Amino acid sequence: MWRRSASFVLDKRQLAQASPPHQQILLSSDDMEPNNLPNPNPSTDHGISAYYQTRAEHHAVVTSDWLAQAQAAVTRNAAVPEVLPKIAATGGSRAAGSGKAFSVIDEFNYWRKKPDLAEAVAAIMALAAFIRSSEATTMMELEIELKKASDTLKSWDTTSISLSAGCDLFMRYVTRTSALEYEDFNAAKLRLIERGEKFGEISLKARRTIAMLGQDFVFDGSTILVHGYSRVVLEVLKLAASNRKMFRVLCTEGRPDRTGLRFSNELAQLGVPVKLLIDSAVAYTMDEVDMVFVGADGVVESGGIINMMGTYQIALVAHCMNKPVYVAAESYKFARLYPLDQKDLAPAIRPIEFGVPIPSGVEVERNARDYTPPQYLTLLFTDLGVLTPSVVSDELIQLYL
Amino acid sequence: MPDVQTLVNDFVLKLKRRKIEGSQASAKQTAELLRSVVSQQRLPYINQATVLLDAVRAVGEQLIAANPVELAVGNIVRRILHIIREEDLTSTASAMEGLSLSANSDDDDNYEREDHQALSAAAVAAAARSTLRAPSLQTLLEGIPESASAPHPSSSGGDSEGKSKSAERSSRSKKLKHDVIEAINELIQDIETCHEQISEQAVGLIHQNEVILTLGRSRTVKEFLCAANEKKRSFRVFIAEGAPRYLGHVLAKELVAKGLQTTVITDSAVFAMISRVNMVIVGAHAIMANGGVIAPVGINMVALAAQRHAVPFVVVAGSHKLCPLYPHNPEVLLNDFKSPSDLLDFGEFSDCMDFSTSGGSPRLHVVNPAFDFIPSKLVSLFITDTGGHSPSYIYRLIADYYSADDFVVRRRSTTS
């Protein structure tokens, strides 16, 4: 509620005044506003989440205003040498700040372009490649360089939880004491590269493991409600369909990303009966639903998940009607966050098109994701096995302690 | 070998005909049978654990198929598979360490290799212990490269090491079997004494002048209550009779003989009486991986009543009842349907059993399920022989007792 308070409104106005070159853009159209701010800085009014832009890029939902922003970003970045570019449609931004022949951002972009690859896995691959190309001669130096590269990647998009969780896990992996047992630096480095690439491979295979675990829970004649476009959930349903299970799927529309349309496309190709619902129709159809399947952008320490906006709502309704909510998430998404309520997370801003111009002075809630507390989740399918939400914090403690 | 096969066949027949009553008896006899299988199995010099695992798995598959409803059989099979894996890894780890010590006495210019070996032995042991646990973030990171390097040092041994290795191997072969059989003996011991260990915790749970509710008759509950009674706690027991078998009546007699104040009520009266009750204590047929409980029919109703009136619902069960499967598994979805004669007398209702109706089946159906499924959120506490646990902790116990590879017991053509 503090956002509605007078002090916050004052702050917002001050902020708007503090960045004069962007002021006219701020006031003109809601959609155009955020991208022209510099690099996402959590303390100021937030930039567009690059994470969601990536998803748009992959899934070809390119709106006209997004293109315009991208164009503006390219021209702006060409003029201003910045360490961390906004991702333009042409992908032409370079990381000027690293100053090395090998840029971890470039490597990351290369991996990220593959539509099947999750962002965190791309980061892990990039970091593994970074170790390979590093010119450090001691472990300490290597670690410091790796930390810098990891920070660079993380700050590419501060709002992406799976990215920072993946980077953290990799760093943890690399700096464990067993890696330091080797007297010979080259052997140690080889070992790190090996393990880094192995970690990358495991993360790639994670989806298959999760699919095998999850498809067990789909029984014949079941009705599944799906929210958001999760490649992991798609894999689960694909495997269930190929195992000749008879089920039908209800997809929420997923405004504004149109995830429901994309998901229903994929499922229709598999021959699975699909029904599209508008987001508001979830409670209306909940009693014919047998289970809810969602993916996750991140799994937090409490066992709750961070996922596309609307997941919390659906979990609440499902809980109220005693329907199980299953989450499919890879283990590298486990993050050391503990949000107590929705406002504890930095919002990931997403441009929303209403089709008609919005009157001035009207605010739009543009956050793209929400937090679902663990008591509304039934089970999590991860590559570590089928877990109840309380197990997640145990896993994280075991790892980081 | 033929001797063991006859034993197995006998046991399978007994299971099929439901001649073995109760999870404890089934568990104990399964463990004893598998112990004979292990002791009579001939082991080659290498890959012993795999051979043992295959043998146990082959027998286990038959046992589980004989009576799928009795989950304790499958639990014990999986426990023993886990034991074999554990013992194998401990003996490999100690053998590795022994090997690296002997390597130290070898050539001086093997300095680097021996150093690597000494390190990897410790690392292998650590990785081995962690591979045994259910996969976690930690084990994910320790990963396969470590354990893949385990056979490496042994294969890189020189001639002088070769002789000492073969001597070690033959002693190892006997050692593995011996260790496994010892561990199985411990398991049987645990199964036999589970009631005593559970009853020890009774005093801490039941307090003076409390009212306890139970349904039907569970041997574990009976011993639990008697133990508290012996420690001079005075409390009262409400027993819901547990139709249609009415085992609650039997329990009532037993408790009165021990000097406990008992009240017998019908199952339908549970909701009426629950507000007068301080705690509900029931037994279970099996505990599932998510903390859900398979219990005699009627107990789900008691659990709901307890939740409605905020009465703690305690489940007492031995650890052999802990099943690593989830309730959706097809094997677990089976409910045992008993004879309808428990409910209705055939003589009186014979005219309803009219097969000449248009459907070809009589209009009267009688359903007599043996079990109920209680979701984990209704259970407050589990008391097992290892102590008291909350439902969210069950996954930990499962990780301790079982290996993830064994959840589906099926004979594999290739070694894992």
Image (cartoon, coloured by chain):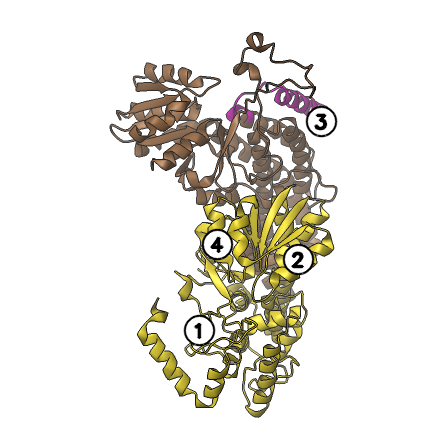
SS for callout 4: helix
CA gap, disc 2 and disc 1 = 31 Å
Whether labels 4 and 2 belong to a single chain: the reply is yes
Q: Nearer the viewer, mark 4 or mark 3?
A: 4
Is residue B5 covered in magenta? yes
| Contact flag, marks 3 and 1 (Cβ < 8 Å) | no
Q: Which chain is yellow?
A: A
Q: Chain of mark 2?
A: A
| Label 2 crowd (10 A; few <14 / some 14-19 / many >=20) | many
**Foreground tag (3 vs 2):** 2
Residue A140, numbered label: none
Mark 2 residue type: Ser
Give the numbered dot on residue A264.
Answer: 2
State which chain disc 1 sits on: A
Q: Nearer the viewer, mark 2 or mark 1?
A: 1
Residue occupying image coordinates x 40% and y 86%: A17
Label drawn at residue B1: 3
In space, the residues marked 1 and 4 are separated at their CA atoms by 37 Å
Residue carrying label 4? A392
Q: Identity of the amino acid at label 1?
A: Glu
Which badge, 4 or 2, comes first in the chain's sequence?
2
- The answer to whether one can see residue A128 in this image is no
Residue B221, image x and y in percent? 40, 26
Comparing labels 1 and 4, the label whose residue is closer to the camera: 1
Mark number displayed over residue A363: 1
Chain B shown in which color? brown
Residue A13 appears in the rendering: yes
Give the alpha-carbon distance from disc 3 to disc 1, as whole Å.
Answer: 80 Å
